[in-house]
Amino acid sequence: MGVNKIINLIKTKVSLYWKCQLLGWSLVSIYWAYTVYNRDNYGVFYTLVNYMLDISIGIFLTHMYRQFVIKAKWSILPIKPLLIRLLPTIILLAVMYVILNNFKWYAYWTYVAGNNKNLLASILYWDPILLTGLRLMSIWVLAYHLYHYYQKEVITAKENAKLTLITKQAELDNLSAQLNPHFLFNSLNSIKSLVVENPNVARRAIDLLSDLLRSSLYDKDKDLIPIKNELSLVYDYIELEKMRFEERLQLKTNIDDDLNNYKIPTLSIQLLVENAIKHGIDLKVGGGVVFLKIYKQEGDIYITVENPGVINQHKSVGLGLKNLKKRLEIQYKDKAVFSLTAKENDCIVAEIVIPMHIEDEKI
C-alpha cells in the first residue's frame, strides 16, 4: 500500500469520526435547546449559544476520552479487561459532564440573567443531569468500542481469508510442481523406447511432447482449465503413447459437448488416462481400451476413465493420484469426489465428480 493511499485512508477515517461527532451531538443537543427556549425563556440568541455549548461539551469530553484510549491502547484489550475499565470511566465522564453543564448554567443565570446564584451549589446540582450524563456517555463509549471491535473483527477476518487463500495457492502450486515432473518422466520413458526402434516416430513423439510441455508451461499458473483444452492435451498424450503401444492401445470417448467450456483442475483427465495406461494397458499382453466418458448429472460433472486391470490391494495409490485428490479437496473445499474402484471382468474405473458452478467454472 502506497503512502498516498495510507494518508487518504487516515483522512477518510478521521472525516467519518468527526462527521459522527458533529451529527450525533447536534441531534442530542436539540432537546436541550428546545427545553431552555420554551421553559427557561433563553431567547433565540442565547438558545443558539447554549446549543453550541452543549455540542462543544459533548465533543470535548468524548474526544478527550478517545485521545486517552488511543494513547492507552484500550482498543486492543480483550473484552473482559476493557469492560472493567469502562464502568468507572463512564462515571467519571458523566461527572465531568455534570460539572461543565452546571457551570454553563451558572454563568448564564449569574452574568446574563443577573440572578445571584451560589457557584458551589450550582456546580454540585446533579438531578437529573447526572442520569443524562451517564446515559449519553454510556451510549457514546459503548458505540465507540463496538465500532472498533467490529472493525478489528472485519480486519482479522480479511487477514484470515487472505492467509487461507495464500495457503491454498501454495498447496496447489506445490502439488502442480510435483505433477508436471511426474508427467515428463513418464513421457520421456515412452520416447526412450522409440529412439532405437523407430527414429522417425521418435521425432514425432518429441514434437508431441514439446507441444504438451508448451501447453503445460502456459497453463502452469492456472488452477483450472477448460475441458476442451484438457482434452487436447489428452489426445496429444494418447498419440504419443500409441507410438509405443501401437494397436495395443485404443481410446474411446463419450463426451458431452455442452461441457467443453467448463473448467476443471489442470492435467486431471490427463493424469487419469496416464494412470490407466501405466497400470492397466501396459500390464496386459494384448493391451486394451481406455474409455473416457464426461457427462453431467444432477448439477455435477462426471469424468470417468475405464481401463482393463486390477487394483493391487497391497500397493498404495501413486503420488499422482494422491496429489490429484488433494488438489480436488483444496479447489472445491471437499465438494468434489475422486474414486478408484474395481469392476467385474478385470476392469478399473477412476472417477472424478466435480460440482458445476456456472459463474465460476464456465468461460
Image (tube, rainbow, N blue to C red):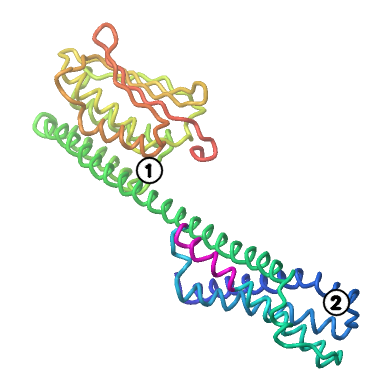
Q: Give the range drawn in magenta.
A: 80-92
Q: Which amino acid does the dot numbered 2 rest on?
A: Val
Specify whether residue 336 is in view.
yes
Q: Badge 2 local density, few (<14 within 10 Å), some, or many (20+)?
A: some
Mark 1 or 2 closer to N-term?
A: 2
Q: Which amino acid does the dot numbered 1 rest on?
A: Asp
Q: Name the residue under label 1.
A: 223
Specify whether residue 289 is in view.
no
Quarter location, residue 177 = top left
Numbered disc total:
2
Taking the magenta stretch, the answer to whether it contains residue 29 is no
Q: Position of residue 65 (x, y in %)?
A: 56, 75
Q: Badge 1 local density, few (<14 within 10 Å), some, or many (20+)?
A: some
Q: In this rendering, is residue 52 above or below 85?
A: below
Q: In this view, does 26 lie to the left or right of 207?
A: right
Q: Residue lying at the far top in this picture: please name it.
A: 345
Taking the magenta stretch, the answer to whether it contains residue 82 is yes
Q: Position of residue 55 (x, y in %)?
A: 72, 77
Residue at the spot 33% in from the left edge and 37% down from the top edge: 327
Quarter location, residue 143 = bottom right
Q: In this view, does 155 lie to the left or right of 222?
A: right
Quarter location, residue 19 = bottom right
Is 80 or 358 nearer to us in this picture? 80
Q: Where is residue 133 in the image (x, y as percent from the top left)?
A: 68, 70
Residue at the spot 56% in from the left edge and 59% down from the top edge: 146
Between disc 1 and disc 2, the foreground one is 2
Is 53 or 278 nearer to us in this picture? 53
Q: Position of residue 98 (x, y in %)?
A: 68, 76
